[in-house]
Image: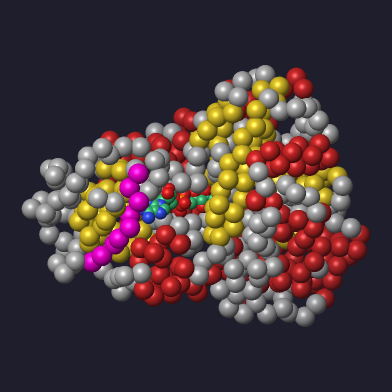
Amino acid sequence: MREAQTRTEAGQVVVIGGGIAGLAAAHRVLAGGRRVTVLEASDRVGGKLLPGEIAGVRVDLGAESMLARRPEAVALAREVGLAGRLQPPATATASIWTRGALCPMPKGHVMGVPGTAAALAGVLSEEGLARIERDADLPRTEVGDDVAVGEYVAARLGREVVDRLVEPLLGGVYAGDAYRISMRSAVPQLYQAALTHDSLTEAVREIQAKAAANQQTGPVFMGIEGGVGQLPLAVAESVRARGGEIVTGAPVTELRREASGGWRVVAGDRVLRADAVVVAVPAPAAAALLRAEAPGAAAELAAVEYASMALITLAYRRADTALPAGSGFLVPPVDGRTIKASTFASQKWGWIADEDPDTLVLRTSVGRYGETDILGRDDAHLVDVSRRDLKQATGLDATPVRTRVTRWTDGLPQYPVGHHARVARVREHIAKVPGLAVCGAQYDGVGIPACIASAYAAVDQLDGDLSGVQDLTANPVQSLHGGAGE
Ligand SMILES: Cc1cc2nc3c(=O)[nH]c(=O)nc-3n(C[C@H](O)[C@H](O)[C@H](O)COP(=O)(O)OP(=O)(O)OC[C@H]3O[C@@H](n4cnc5c(N)ncnc54)[C@H](O)[C@@H]3O)c2cc1C
């Protein structure tokens, strides 16, 4: 049994899950002067953030980019010592591979929804553009409590905008289906605008005018030299340096409240006692853990669906390749290709190009919600279809020197219509249980900054529960086995 550590306030918090949400929660707990232990099931921290290597070049094998227009991810990176390694993309130009050609990604849209038909010239057919013009004359489309993005946008502007632009853009974030995804949860600014505007294009123009007035400058996205997979490693290091404990290879199997009011957390033969618990694991695992103490929340979480995908990373001799300019391209499902996107990693990130100027790295992704056949195929097949599609899109015909397939089974929670109401119900159930909070990708957004924000909100919620907690020195964490580490 180890000694309790010195602290300024009482309160031992256990965080279950060592993805970016769990680690950000631990970081926040320590900032509040309490003690923290993170229990991570796998043998590494980071979850969907995974640094790796191909042909001697460091790359991200999971998430690769952080939205910089909201503060949380970039701010956390700075706090844990990565300020000097933050890097914007080397190019902000992307394409869309549609109707047999790579077209420059239009500017002047909100998640694919344009302020004017002219903004989509070159991507949509003449009929598609003419259909957008009709928006101004159509009667109002009610959005109610929530509506599918695709359904609403198609009603206002026609299906072509949805199929050729909204769908691939949303698919890039959720691997979902635009005709199922909640507008209220996934594109809240459009939902809010739709409540007060009859015309969608007018609403988008207003959103754009406000953004211009706010003078949001600087890069929209940010990367990290060495990959955004470095972020969880740096957060974990900072947590440990400030006395937090992170235990990997520790899948939590049981979470129970004790008669005394605290918690008993079981991870294999390790039993921990805590004043408060943050559950930062994906919905199915959270449902299993919460079944005993918050069955209502567990039932809601058990109903959250996930999409699976695979990333295919390919390394080429640079001398063999001549790619179009830009950071890569998206592919609308309606075009019937297998890949749904490709990132020209060596062109998008200066740090990847610098790793080895003679090697060019790019990656493709396959798999959308409900699309299971392609993910059932072996790695060699996924590499073959990626090469076939890349050749058709870009002319790239060289043989890669190395390939790597990374599978993300159930990688992305789906946000269907009504998601916000489900999350509200989960939170209602959780709020009834003192010393319990939840965070992660299935609540308020799947992006890295949103996950971090949900972690901070979870810890802030616990602060109220913990304010009256007595010092636990007489009752420290029972670490039955040592060996904490990544
Ligand atoms: C392929 C892919 C690419 C993406 N690209 C981007 C991108 O470029 N930019 C972006 O912003 N977002 C991206 N995302 C989304 C984003 O990466 C994730 O939503 C986010 O990282 C999820 O973090 P999390 O901490 O909520 O969950 P996770 O990363 O899933 O972490 C949860 C952790 O809990 C652990 N765990 C599970 N059960 C237990 C248990 N019983 N006990 C203990 N531990 C347990 C897991 O092992 C895991 O480490 C991408 C997602 C995927 C799948």
Residue 85, how many percent across, how many down?
A: 49, 31
Q: Nearer the viewer, residue 346 or 70?
A: 346
In the rendered image, the quadrant that contains the N terminus is top left
Is 253 included in the stretch rendered in magenta?
A: yes
Residue 365, how many percent across, how many down?
A: 66, 45
Q: Is residue 84 visible?
A: yes
- Relative to residue 42, is residue 195 drawn left or right? right
Q: Is residue 169 above or below residue 425?
A: above
Which image quadrant for residue 428? bottom left
Question: Residue lying furthest left in this view?
Answer: 474
Question: How many discs appear?
Answer: 0
- Relative to residue 52, is residue 473 drawn left or right? left
Display colour scheme: secondary structure
Q: Is residue 211 visible?
A: no
Q: Nearer the viewer, residue 426 or 364?
A: 364
Span shown in magenta:
249-257
Q: Residue at x 41, y 56 (%)?
A: 281
Residue 88, how many percent across, how many down?
A: 58, 36
Q: Residue at x 8, y 53 (%)?
A: 474
Residue 252, how many percent across, how many down?
A: 33, 54
Q: Residue at x 79, y 39 (%)?
A: 388
Q: Is residue 222 above or below residue 466?
A: above
Q: Residue at x 16, y 64 (%)?
A: 468
Q: Nearer the viewer, residue 247 or 216?
A: 247
Is 165 included in the stretch rendered in magenta?
A: no
Which image quadrant for residue 425? bottom left
In the rendered image, the quadrant that contains the C terminus is top left
